[in-house]
Image (cartoon, rainbow, N blue to C red):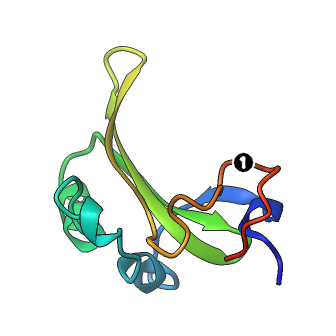
Amino acid sequence: MTRVSDRKIELREMDKTNYREVFNLKVSDDQTQFVAANTHSLAQALFPKEAWYRGIYAGDTAVGFVMLELNYSKPEYYLWRFTIDKKISGKGLWNPGNDSSY
């Protein structure tokens, strides 16, 4: 099995071909109080022009969701939402030296 840490991490636009993959991601039970579900986040992102969102992918596998609030009047942004699926949370996604498998 290919490790998540061996796969290329990229942010992908969400559209009709991949939104369900991101919607199906869940944080661990002890994290649910800290972040909204991805379905709720996307609903919020559809209206303000400042919202910027992407699915986080490791290779072809959806592993997370990120949403920023962009400030167009100055070069600033606000991290609005960031989720990593409970199946890989804490398993070294961002650590290339980790040998955890997903």
Q: Is 14 or 58 nearer to us in this picture?
A: 58
Quadrant of the snapshot with the N terminus: bottom right
In the displayed structure, 78 sits above or below 9; it is above
* Residue drawn at point x = 72 percent, y = 48 percent: 95
Judged left or right of residue 5, residue 91 is: left
Within the image, what quadrant is residue 38 found in? bottom left
Residue indicated by mark 1: 95
Q: Is 48 or 1 nearer to us in this picture?
A: 1
Within the image, what quadrant is residue 40 found in? bottom left
Return the x and y of residue 71 as percentages of the image width and height: 31, 26
In the displayed structure, 91 sits above or below 97; it is below
Quadrant of the snapshot with the C terminus: bottom right
The residue lying furthest to the top in this view is 74
Q: Is 83 or 55 nearer to us in this picture?
A: 83
Judged left or right of residue 56, residue 94 is: right
* Residue drawn at point x = 25 percent, y = 73 percent: 39
* Residue drawn at point x = 61 percent, y = 62 percent: 91
Return the x and y of residue 45 as percentages of the image width and height: 25, 56
Circle 1: is it few (<14), some (14-19), or many (20+) Cα within 10 Å?
A: few
